[in-house]
Amino acid sequence: MATPHVSSFCFVILLCSIAAEAIDGGFTVELIPRDSPKSPFYDPSETLPQRVGKAVRRSIARLAGLRSNTPGDPYGHITSNEGDYLIKLAIGTPPVQIMGIADTGSDLIWTQCKPCHSCFRQDAPLFDPSKSRTYAVVSFHSPKCKVYDETSSSPQGQCLYTARYGDQSYSNGNIATDDISLDSTSGSSIKFSETVFGCGHDNGGAFNAHTSGIVGLGGGDASLISQMGRSYGGMFSYCLVPFFSTSSSKLSFGLHAHVSGRGTVSTPLIQKSPKTFYYLTLEGISINGKKFTVAGSSTHGAGNIFIDSGTTVTSLPPDLYQQIEPAVASAIHLPRVQDPTGSLNLCYRSFGMFTTAPNITVHFTDADVKLNYYNAFVHVAEDVVCFTFVPSSCEKVVYGNLAQMNFLIGYDIARRKVSFKPADCSYH
């Protein structure tokens, strides 16, 4: 059985099926937020605070799903498919476009396939492997079947997978290979031949008709990132625009993903189990110049936090959060109110732009990341602004996507580092 893991990193990546070489050893694709006008989830009747509130609730639910990922569980868990971004793929020859959830907390790519014994409704046509000239079912004895921690063979000797998620969603099917192509922002198309993916014949749960599966972008062997292999040097980067921006974000691979220049700081990428996650080491957080450390935390030490672009809020070790909440509260002179979403602890009555936020710096090993006010505070209602750091209720500590917005963030798998550079992501 393939084992998916926790959290969702979700983008609409526009993909195409025409094979071509990457320009200068790298390429860039467009990222479209889940609630963007370009997304099928877009609801023009919703206000920005309403969209933010929904994203926060999805994030809290995802963190709750992490709590159920206890030792001894046969499957990893994520929450639902209500992620912040989607990914659009073309699979097969001739190509069939699918839309899935791009997930840095999962490794396996899977989509619903014919024959579908039990499937959730989807808007796009189901992928029919019998009509693809390049499709092949991986046998149980194939080396490609061994990239999974758990596998089982069918009576026909095929490699099977079973995916179970924290919200009781699931997918079962065959491990297969086929062509997958990506359309770059320059107009060139990049094809990856014989890409391993899951062909789901029995799928259900909380999945939405706008989607048709999962696209794993984690660090494990079966993810899209890993299957790109040496072609792009194990490098990718993204630049996430703030919620209030109307621009699209970008995801880059290879040489286009190199992050350097003035203001760039880098921190070691820690190898831990499961290797799906991108672990960093959080040393502390400063509020208006006063540093609070994680030295006394049960989650101190190397690799004590993972960076996740699909989780909106940032969850901290409880003892660290208990130190910084009073420091943040003492710096803000506005009326305290309850969070109308019921998700966040520290909220204030505030109209218009929030200008009284304290200076906040996140200290990773060798990398001090100074946040903007919108990296730590969001309007969850027209007149309510909340602090988006929360205490973790489990051992999983997550650096969420609000804290990452307007930073160019590069992952260098070969050199084992993650780099941060302040940026206006609407221009990247």
Image (cartoon, rainbow, N blue to C red):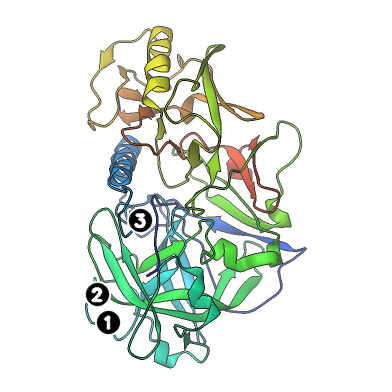
Q: Do the residues labelled 2 and 3 touch (CB within 8 Å)?
A: no
- Mark 1 is surrounded, within 10 Å at the Cα level, by few (under 14), some (14 to 19) or many (20 or more) other residues, namely some
Q: Nearer the viewer, residue 34 or 138?
A: 138
Q: Is mark 1 on a helix, strand or loop?
A: loop
Q: Quadrant of residue 156?
A: bottom left
Q: Which of 94 and 272 is in front in this view?
A: 272
Mark 2 / mark 3, whichever is N-terminal: 3
Q: In which quarter of the image is residue 63?
A: top left
- Residue type indicated by callout 1: Cys
Task: Please state if 268 lies on the left or on the right of 161 as rendered.
Answer: right
Q: Are marks 3 and 1 in contact (CB under 8 Å)?
A: no
Q: Which mark is residue 76?
A: 3
Task: Please state if 374 lies on the left or on the right of 206 as rendered.
Answer: right
Measured in 3D between alpha carbons, the distance from the residue under mark 1 to the one under mark 2, in whole angstroms, is 6 Å
* Residue appearing at x 33%, y 35% in the figure: 49
Q: Quadrant of residue 151?
A: bottom left
* Residue appearing at x 38%, y 11% in the figure: 326
- Residue type indicated by callout 3: Gly
Q: Which mark is residue 116?
A: 1
Tell me the residue that label 2 is attached to.
Answer: 119
Look at the image and tell me in which quarter the N terminus lies: bottom left
Above or below for 213 versus 37? below
Q: Are marks 1 and 2 in contact (CB under 8 Å)?
A: yes
Tell me where residue 233 appears, x and y as whole percent.
71, 60
Mark 3 / mark 1, whichever is N-terminal: 3
Measured in 3D between alpha carbons, the distance from the residue under mark 2 to the one under mark 3, in whole angstroms, is 21 Å
Task: Please state if 185 lies on the left or on the right of 195 as rendered.
Answer: right
* Residue appearing at x 43%, y 9% in the figure: 331
